Amino acid sequence: MKISKTKRLTLHLTAVIMALCAFTACTQGGEYDNDNGNGGGSGGGGGSHNQESGQITASANRLYIDAMLDKYYLYNDAYRQTSRNYNQSYSNFLDDVLDQMHAKGQNPKDGFEYDGEWYFYSYVEREKSAAGRAEGSLYDEIPREYAYGTGMYLVLVRLSSNPFYYGVTPLWVYPDSPAYKAGIRRGDLITQINGKNTTLASLKGSYADLLDDEFYSKKSYKLSIEADDGSLNTVTVETDYYYPNPILFERIYNVAGRIAGYLVYNGFDAAYDNDLLEVFDRFKAAGVEDVILDLRYNGGGHVISSRLLSAVLAGPHCKGKVFAYYRYNDERMKKDYDITDLSDATAFPCELFDGDYERYADSYGFENVYVIGGRNTASASELTINSLRGLDRNVILIGCEPTNGKDVGMEVTTSTRSFDGYVYTLAPISFQTYNAKGESDYDDGFTPDIKPAPIQSSSGTYHTYDEFMPEDWGMLYPGSNGSIQKFDYLADALYAIAGGTLSSSDLSVVTDGGETALTAVVPRCKMMLVQPATRSGNGNEGLRIRRRNPFENNMVKPLDDRDRQF
């Protein structure tokens, strides 16, 4: 098996799994490292600000990364057996030690295999000091942070094979981002970029430009969106700052007399937990009984947001109950928690639904939870599923394939000491979670309870895994005699709520964000996903969330539960 260099499953999704490529330049604060694999020792002290001197790199590796892995890495005993070369770039240093352990099978839960390669969860990033933030979250320590770019996540699609014809389409567009303000929405088919048709040859250059690693560089793109009749609408999108709110879409349905709330939630970002509670306030006010939680692109985030969401969904069923048990490395378990029986999950330190979470339990609670997911549904998303099942809540998973299988999390820290003008953020896996029943080890992911049937069309057979891109989040196609055909995960959830049959007279929208009409026509049946354009260099794909700094004077101190990230 080929062992890859470190790839991160960050708070959103791993690009490798879903063939995603970021049209946005991610969150503020980061600058990419021109890491060419030559090691820091030959860099000297001059040259570009992105180059690391051997002295600075060695100091960061020794004083920060080494100290953190030695104390907090889930497999710290194995780490201590590695051969460590401090005089190389910080990312190569982490890659090197992780690869050594992986080759010996010593860190089996750090990552996953995809298409013959191993992708580690643990990651390290180098960044400049933080810029624009906004307060207003439930937790003062976790402010909102700006992202910079256009605010879209694109996939490359092949529209026909004879001749080969390509386009790009956004899986989502962040609300109030530059792309959203320009009128671009999920499912729009972009066939020209800056006046050039999106052939494979032109896309190589266009994607290289769109995915440029330069942050905060003001750029303008002319994007031509093709309508069903072949006409083009060209809009101009300029990169700018925006807040990447993970709450992408909400809607409330009346489904054959039952009220269902639908939420597309893209990341467990605690800075937006107030917004999350406001969604469920609207659900409760409308009399929602069943919640459809769309986590198909949600790669995780804050554990505290997972606990909040679990409390809101479980309601009174979680009062006084365990949200999760945590298993750290053996040394920490014995020293910090005085636990000697490491085979009994219920002996591990636990997190309860208490305090404010019990207040949320009094205010909310729903009968059934339908989770839409897949291989990008990971970490805190899976923690929420596992926690609810530990409380015997009815959680129905809808998708074509299992979830990611990440039952471990990271404690994310940032160095207080600046090395040559940079600070370092490190996220080693450091704990495994168990639900109230002591259940964990879902390395293969959670298997869907409902699998959408494949679609038969003149172009062949497809499985509904975003091969068909609706202009709306739910794809409902009008059939004969007032029936509604199922073409999307949301439709399958609505069918399940309705008891297996659904007609247009049985379904109506109670409240709508005004995005689109209820029924969306299936666009372009020949649309299919193809290989992604990949980001060059050391990318910071996905949303990053900074935590309170757990260091003082370069000394490692015990971490707080709010530093825990899934």
Image (cartoon, grey):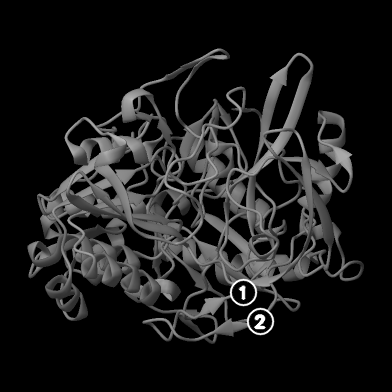
Tell me which residue sits at (39%, 53%) in the image: 77
Amino acid type at mark 2: Ala
The number of callouts visible is 2
Vertical placement of residue 279 versus 403, above or below: below
Q: Which mark is residue 335?
A: none
If the image is split into quadrants, where does the N terminus sit?
A: top right
Q: Residue furthest front?
A: 481
The quarter holding residue 2 reads: top right
Q: Which mark is residue 131?
A: 2
214 sits to left or right of 69: right
Residue 491: image location, x then y, percent: 35, 37
Nearer the camera: disc 2 or disc 1: 1
Amino acid type at mark 1: Tyr
* Local crowd size for mark 2, using a 10 Å CA cut-off: few (<14), some (14–19), many (≥20): few
Q: Secondary structure at mark 2?
A: loop
If the image is split into quadrants, where does the C terminus sit?
A: bottom left
209 sits to left or right of 154: right
Residue 83 visible in the snapshot: no
Label 2–label 1 contact, CB within 8 A = yes
51 sits to left or right of 144: right
Pick whichever, 127 or 252, lies toward us. Answer: 252
Residue 397: image location, x then y, percent: 27, 39
176 sits to left or right of 203: left
Pick whichever, 175 or 124, lies toward us. Answer: 175
Pick whichever, 397 or 453, lies toward us. Answer: 453
Q: Which residue is mark 1?
A: 146
Vertical placement of residue 264 versus 451, above or below: below
Tell me which residue sits at (51%, 35%) in the image: 521
